[in-house]
Image (cartoon, grey):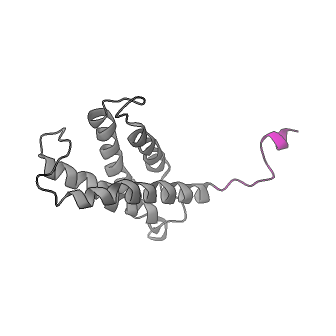
Amino acid sequence: MRSLLRLEAVALQPDLALLLLRVWFGLSLCVLHGWGKIGRLSADPVQFADPFGLGMGPSLALAAAAEVVGALMVVIGLATRWAALGVIVTMATAFFFAHGGKLTGEGNGEMPFLFLGAFLAIFLAGPGRFSVDDKLK
């Protein structure tokens, strides 16, 4: 009975789980959020949150870089923890500054909150065996 409750018939696959987590959230962030920011870089004038006083253009460029380049680096597992850290900072900034830390209601930060959790997990666990980082050891 205990083995049934623990699903012991299905072997644990932590490296495969990390690959799935990296690819799922990395591609989702890049395609669904990052690409759109790349297109907005050419807008005149750029309209984007500027929580650190860098200017709207530089703030947008940093967010776009994290959401496209950083996310794709996480997908392939290259400098994974550094790339995830860039995404973590971006998502924390989006959640707390752009969305006021709200999880419900109009203009909520549910998406950055979910991405923040996923990339924190990747940062803490590392990329796993199926990654460029592992091959470069």
**Residue at the image point whose x is 56% and y is 58% from the top:** 20
Q: Which residues are magenta?
A: 1-13
Magenta stretch encompasses residue 107: no
35 versus 103 height, above or below: below
Percent of width and height locating residue 80: 41, 58
Residue 53 drawn at (x, y percent): 12, 40
Picture layout, residue 63 above or below residue 74: above
From the image, which quarter does the N terminus lie in? Answer: top right
Residue at (60%, 60%) from the top-left corner? 16
Q: Residue 76, position in %: x, y?
A: 45, 66
Residue 79: tell me if it is visible: no
In this rendering, the answer to whether 60 lies above or below 105 is: below
Q: Residue at x 76, y 53 (%)?
A: 10
Q: Characterize the magenta stretch by its predominant secondary structure.
A: loop
Q: Quadrant of residue 78?
A: bottom left
**Residue with the most extreme bottom position:** 135
Picture quadrant where residue 132 is located: bottom left
Of residues 79 and 48, the one nearer the viewer is 48
Q: 35 and 134: which one is in front?
A: 35
> What's the residue at 42%, 31% (across, down)?
103
Q: Is residue 65 left or right of residue 126?
A: left
> Is residue 82 shown left or right of residue 57?
right
The quadrant of the picture occupied by the C terminus is: bottom left
Magenta stretch: includes residue 3? yes
Q: Is residue 56 visible?
A: yes
Residue 86 percent location from the top left of the image: 31, 51
